Structures are given as structure tokens and as C-alpha cells.
């Protein structure tokens, strides 16, 4: 039975994957809103835009021409944040420390249809994206230069997405990013003590309680994690202990695609808008070490708070103290589950 104190009184919740806390203030959810309202775009996009540098057959800014792709298309980012030929150097001047970083950045177009998002694509279409994610994880991870592969998507202008064409990115690099370092440590420590995955144990508890589960199929669970920061943050977790996405079988990839389809469609129904978010897959590093403590997962961080026009800002206390939320995970899951 749900602990009612969690719905009525301010408290902290522990993120077991990072070791960090989030402040939850459920009593503030009733406060009136007089802050910024985001503009809602009702733009109907065409299936092809001759000015879009991601559409099939169009020329990109560097002069390269996209092929007439009919499914998923991947290319090296023309404005990559990481360089393969970056000079190797370090700075160690008292408290001034820096080191060079190398990597490979790619763009993945989910569909040639400019008007679509993942929410508009069938699970079989999304599966083609999943299969390419697997290919890229292996291809990039096999490169001696690369020790981590970060797959992510920024959807919507409010998330800083500069092009509405359905696409994501893959950044791969020599060292582990900050968030991955935290999760690597937490998962390793738990696995060392218990000889099992911390997410697997957590998933068992969530499936027993059924308080934060949105959807499940034979292979995956979509839930709002107990420690969620963003109002409608969700996580897709494989039921089997898999360290990375390359361990998915043919059946798994379609089940994963179905889970992505379900949650993105529910998001769009929530406030009757093309729901913005940042999503990403956290999985085992490709550093050749024993990473059996890892249990891969995909997270969605949407910024919308109360409607299509009201956004959650990470400011003030969140910048100087710790993350904070008003709507509890349990309240949010009811809203999303009712849309399935």
C-alpha cells in the first residue's frame, strides 16, 4: 500500500543509481502559477522539407549530400563536440587541471519523414532505430579510442533541438562522462556486495508494489522511478539483466521498440502537444573491463510541468542545493497510465 506520508509531506528520496538525493514537496503542487508560459507550436510539418539538412537527398552545410535513405540514416556530425584528432595534452597547474578528450560524434535520422517523431512511428519502424543503435554501440565501442558510447535524443525546441526532423545523436569518447561515472560506482558497489544487479532488485520491488509502473511487456518495464527529478520523468528497464543494448535478442528489440512507442505516445496525449524531452541510454562502458554490474536502461527527462505551456526550470535551490519536485512520482504515473 502506498505510503500516504510521501504524498502529503516534504521529504527526500534517494537515487540509488547516482547516490544523490532529490527533495520532494507534494504540498506545493497546489500553488498558483504566475511564472513563464512556453509558446505551443501547432505547426504541421511536411513529410519533406527542401530546406532541412537532414531530409533525404538534401545537401548539408559542409556540402555533403544525404542519400535518398528510406529508413534509418547515420552520419558523422558535421559540428562534432569531440574530435578524433584532438592533440593529446594535460594541464596540472596547482588547482588548474585539464586534460584532452577525444571522441566520435554521430547523428542518427530515425525516419526520412520530416513530419514524424518517435511517437508517430510504428514499433516496427522504431525497431529499425534500435537495431542501428546496437550497430553503432558495437562499431564505436570496438574502436580502441572509445571507452563509452552515449546515445541520446533532444526533442523539441524547448530542449534546444535545432532541427525538428526526427533524429538523435551518439557521442562516444575516451573517458566516462560524469553521470555515467556515478552510476558505474553505485552499480559496482551493489553488485560487489550482493552479486546481483541493483536495478534488477529495484525492478522486482516495483513490480510487486505496482505503484509507479506505467507499462510492461514480456521484456521491459516503463516506470517513473521513485527518485525521479523531472515531473514526468520515466525509465525503460529490461527485465533481464543485460549490461548493454547489444545483448538484446531479435525478440527483445521489438519489445523495446514497443515500450518506446507506448511512452512517447502517452507523452503526446498528456497535454495534447508534441511532448518535448531529452532521452538517453545509459549502459556499460566499452573499456574492455568486467562490467557485469551494469544493468542498462533508457531515461526520458521531459521539462513540462502542468500543461503544454508551463515548464519546469532547474533554478535557485536546484542550482545551489539539490533537485526538487512538487508532483510526486505516484501522482505523475496515474496521469500517464490513464492515457494508455
Image (tube, helix red, strand yellow):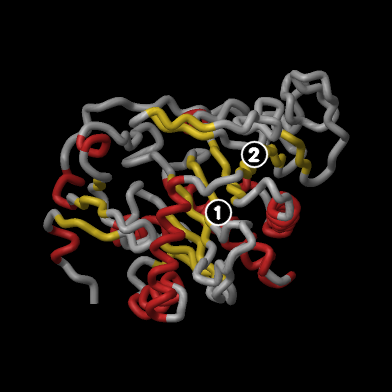
Mark 1, residue position: 281
Q: Nearer the viewer, residue 95 or 281?
A: 95
Q: Position of residue 321 (x, y in %)?
A: 21, 41
Kindly identify the residue that appears in the image at 35 percent across and 61 percent down.
334
State the residue position of label 2. 103
Nearer to us in this view, 165 or 301: 301
Q: Residues within 10 Å of mark 1 (few under 14, many from 20)?
A: many
x 18%, y 62%: residue: 6
Q: Is residue 198 above or below residue 306?
A: below
Q: Which residue is at the front of the view, 140 or 332?
A: 140
Residue that protrudes farthest toward the right in the picture: 68
| Residue 193 vertical position relative to residue 336 in the rendered view, above or below | below
Name the one closer to the observer, 97 or 311: 97
Residue 316, can we see it?
Answer: yes
Residue 88 appears left or right of 204: right
Can the viewer see residue 203 in this picture?
Answer: no
Q: For numbered disc 1, what is the local secondary structure?
A: strand
x, y percent for residue 104 = 68, 39
Q: Are marks 2 and 1 in contact (CB under 8 Å)?
A: no
Q: Position of residue 142 (x, y in %)?
A: 73, 55
> Is the residue 215 above or below the residue 172 in the image?
below
Badge 2 density bin: few <14, some 14–19, many ≥20, Cα 10 Å: many
Q: Cα distance, mark 2 to mark 1?
A: 18 Å
Residue 290, given in percent of the width and then of the height, sits at: 57, 69
Within the image, what quadrant is residue 195 found in? bottom left
Residue 113 in the figure: left or right of residue 10:
right
Q: Which of the 4 quarters of the picture holds residue 309?
A: top left
For marks 2 and 1, the one nearer the N-term is 2
Residue at x 70%, y 44% (from the top left corner): 110
Question: Is 237 positioned to the left or the right of 58 in the image?
Answer: left
Toward which corner of the image does residue 130 lie, by quadrant?
bottom right
The secondary structure type at the circle numbered 2 is strand
Amino acid at each position: 500500500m502506498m505510503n500516504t506520508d510521501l504524498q502529503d509531506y516534504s521529504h527526500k528520496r534517494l537515487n540509488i543509481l547516482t547516490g544523490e538525493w532529490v527533495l520532494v514537496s507534494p504540498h506545493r503542487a497546489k500553488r498558483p502559477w504566475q511564472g513563464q508560459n512556453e509558446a505551443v507550436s501547432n505547426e504541421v510539418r511536411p513529410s519533406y522539407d527542401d530546406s532541412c539538412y537532414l531530409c533525404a537527398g538534401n545537401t548539408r552545410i559542409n556540402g555533403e549530400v544525404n542519400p535518398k535513405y528510406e529508413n534509418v540514416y547515420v552520419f558523422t556530425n558535421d559540428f562534432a563536440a569531440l574530435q578524433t584528432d584532438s592533440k593529446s595534452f594535460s594541464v596540472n597547474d596547482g588547482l588548474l587541471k585539464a586534460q584532452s578528450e577525444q571522441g566520435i560524434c554521430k547523428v542518427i535520422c530515425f525516419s526520412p519523414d520530416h513530419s514524424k517523431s518517435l511517437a508517430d512511428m510504428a514499433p516496427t519502424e522504431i525497431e529499425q532505430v534500435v537495431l542501428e543503435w546496437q550497430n553503432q554501440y558495437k562499431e564505436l565501442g570496438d574502436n580502441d579510442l572509445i571507452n563509452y558510447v552515449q546515445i541520446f535524443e533532444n526533442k523539441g525546441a524547448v530542449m534546444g533541438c535545432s532541427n525538428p526532423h526526427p533524429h538523435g545523436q551518439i557521442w562516444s569518447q575516451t573517458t566516462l562522462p560524469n553521470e555515467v561515472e556515478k552510476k558505474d560506482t553505485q552499480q559496482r558497489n551493489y553488485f560487489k556486495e550482493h552479486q546481483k544487479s541493483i536495478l534488477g532488485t529495484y525492478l522486482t520491488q516495483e513490480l510487486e508494489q505496482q505503484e509507479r509502473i506505467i507499462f510492461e511487456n514480456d521484456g521491459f518495464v516503463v516506470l517513473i522511478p521513485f527518485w525521479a527529478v523531472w515531473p514526468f520523468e520515466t525509465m525503460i528497464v529490461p527485465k533481464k539483466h543485460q549490461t548493454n543494448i547489444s545483448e538484446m535478442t531479435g525478440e527483445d528489440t521489438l519489445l523495446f521498440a514497443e515500450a518506446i512507442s507506448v511512452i512517447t505516445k502517452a507523452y503526446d496525449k498528456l497535454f495534447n502537444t508534441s511532448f518535448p524531452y531529452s532521452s538517453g541510454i545509459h549502459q556499460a562502458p566499452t573499456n574492455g573491463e568486467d562490467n557485469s554490474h551494469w544493468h542498462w536502461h533508457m531515461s526520458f527527462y521531459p521539462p513540462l510541468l502542468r500543461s503544454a505551456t508551463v515548464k519546469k526550470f532547474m533554478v535557485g535551490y536546484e542550482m545551489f542545493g539539490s533537485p526538487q519536485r512538487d508532483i510526486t512520482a505516484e501522482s505523475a504515473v496515474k496521469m500517464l497510465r490513464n492515457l494508455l
